[in-house]
Amino acid sequence: MEEDKSRKKEKDLKLKELCKVWGPAEAEVIKSFLESHGISSIFQGLVVQSVHPFSTDGLGEIRILVSEKDFVTAKKILEDRFSLEKAEED
């Protein structure tokens, strides 16, 4: 029983890249959207945006990571939201 809990916690800690964005504003919007659906996320990037506020040649790229267990759900809700926005623009 303890082994099952340990494996579950280990799987919860594994992160998977959900998407990449080009600035902190977009990253924060996605993070808030995911949190409103009960999904936690973290950012990973090469440059601290507050120190170097630019996005040239991928330096401003921010990777949004979610738990492996939440990945499928997070991907689906982002894709559904993107499809909805695209349909409204047409």
Image: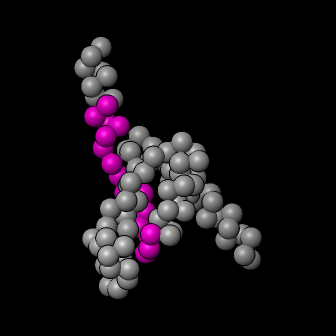
Q: Quadrant of residue 17?
A: bottom left
Residue 4 horizontal side relative to residue 33, left or right: left
| Residue at the far front in the pictured view | 51
Say which residue appears at 57% left-offset and 55% top-offset: 33
Say which residue appears at 63% left-offset and 60% top-offset: 81
Front-lying residue, 22 or 76: 22
The correct choice, above or below, for 88 with respect to 14 in the image is below
Q: Quadrant of residue 3?
A: top left
Quarter of the image with the C terminus in it = bottom right
The magenta stretch spans which residues? Answer: 9-24
Residue 28 included in the magenta stretch of the image: no
Residue 2, image x and y in percent? 27, 16
Q: Quadrant of residue 22?
A: bottom left
Residue 63 horizontal side relative to residue 85, left or right: left
Residue 28 horizontal side relative to residue 49, left or right: right
Say which residue appears at 54% left-offset and 55% top-offset: 32
Residue 68, image x and y in percent? 37, 44
Quarter of the image with the N terminus in it = top left
Front-lying residue, 34 or 86: 34
Say which residue appears at 38% left-offset and 83% top-offset: 54
